Amino acid sequence: MDNKVKSVKKTFDIINTVQALDGASLTTLSQQMGMPKSTAHNYLKSLEEAEYLVNDGGTYRVGIRFLEHGAYARNRMKIHEIAKPEIDKLAADTGELANLLVEEHGLGSYLHRARGDDAVQVEAHVGTRVYLHSTGLGKAILANLPAERRDEILDERGLPERTPQTTTNRYELLDELEEIRERGFAFDDEERLKGLRCVAAPIHSNSDRVIGAISISGPTNRLRGERYREELPNKLLEAMNVIELNITHS
């Protein structure tokens, strides 16, 4: 790897570190990155001048210019434009949190979230990336990917535990993915966040390639029994059908 490529990689490592720390001073960043203060200062000042970082009284933070790039990337994806009205409708009809997720680089990224009147506040937001195996959305995608691509993702990303309910055994996960394929939708029973359940369904393109997933999420005290196992899955499958039809004929 030549010096120019190393410099580009280091730039993004710094951005990711500043975000992970929710802001960092020059000293903190220098220590975290294991680089001299003078080098860290040069990177930080260059990123500030390019308007990708802001200096908040000596604490560097990620700037909102990244929002421009994120919004562009999201809006150029056909699935976002077509699925958004149905996600909003699911949230309004159920009162819960409705979501749209796509896979990129072996992780799931939220493209759209809509909150119903009773929706709970959770940590994820648009742009948040999650491990696929620990969410209903991600499992719905994994279950419908070609086996070779699915195995690549599991090999690269592993099966880290998010809660005691997360499936971390590969063979158990593969059995569950087979059930999801046959059933047509996935459940997430407190596997990413304790106290939260989710029902998710895949979205396919007109060439039958899985391009994302939609879900309804809510607290365990509301997502239970027939509502969790039948009512919400049926609503989700109806929305999935509408989205896929619109994708086919758009």
Image (tube, rainbow, N blue to C red):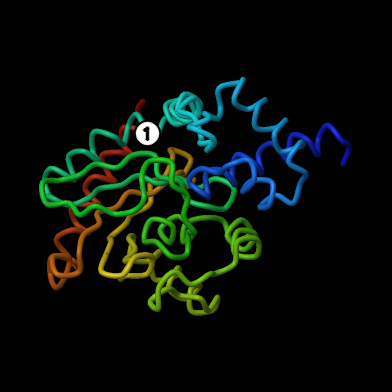
Give 32 or 80, whichever is nearer the viewer. 32
Q: Would residue 32 be found to the left or right of residue 176 on screen?
A: right
**Which corner quadrant holds the C terminus?**
top left
Give 209 or 32, whichever is nearer the viewer. 32
Q: Position of residue 60 (x, y in %)?
A: 54, 36
Q: Residue at x 60, y 61 (%)?
A: 157
Q: Secondary structure at mark 1?
A: helix
Number of numbered markers: 1
Q: Residue at x 47, y 31 (%)?
A: 70
Q: Position of residue 33 (x, y in %)?
A: 70, 49
Give 200 or 247, whichever is nearer the viewer. 200
Q: Position of residue 48 (x, y in %)?
A: 59, 25
Q: Residue at x 48, y 73 (%)?
A: 173
Q: Would residue 153 be found to the left or right of residue 244 on screen?
A: right
Q: For the view shown, which residue lies furthest in the right direction?
A: 2
Q: Residue at x 31, y 32 (%)?
A: 246
**Which corner quadrant holds the N terminus?**
top right
Q: Up-down: is 59 above or below 21?
A: above
Which residue is label 1 attached to?
Answer: 80
Q: Would residue 222 be found to the left or right of residue 200 on screen?
A: left
Q: Up-down: is 209 above or below 198?
A: above
Q: Position of residue 4 (x, y in %)?
A: 83, 31
Query: What residue type is disc 1 on?
Result: His
Q: Would residue 206 be found to the left or right of residue 217 on screen?
A: right
How many C-alpha atoms fall within 10 Å of the one at disc 1: few (<14), some, or many (≥20)?
some
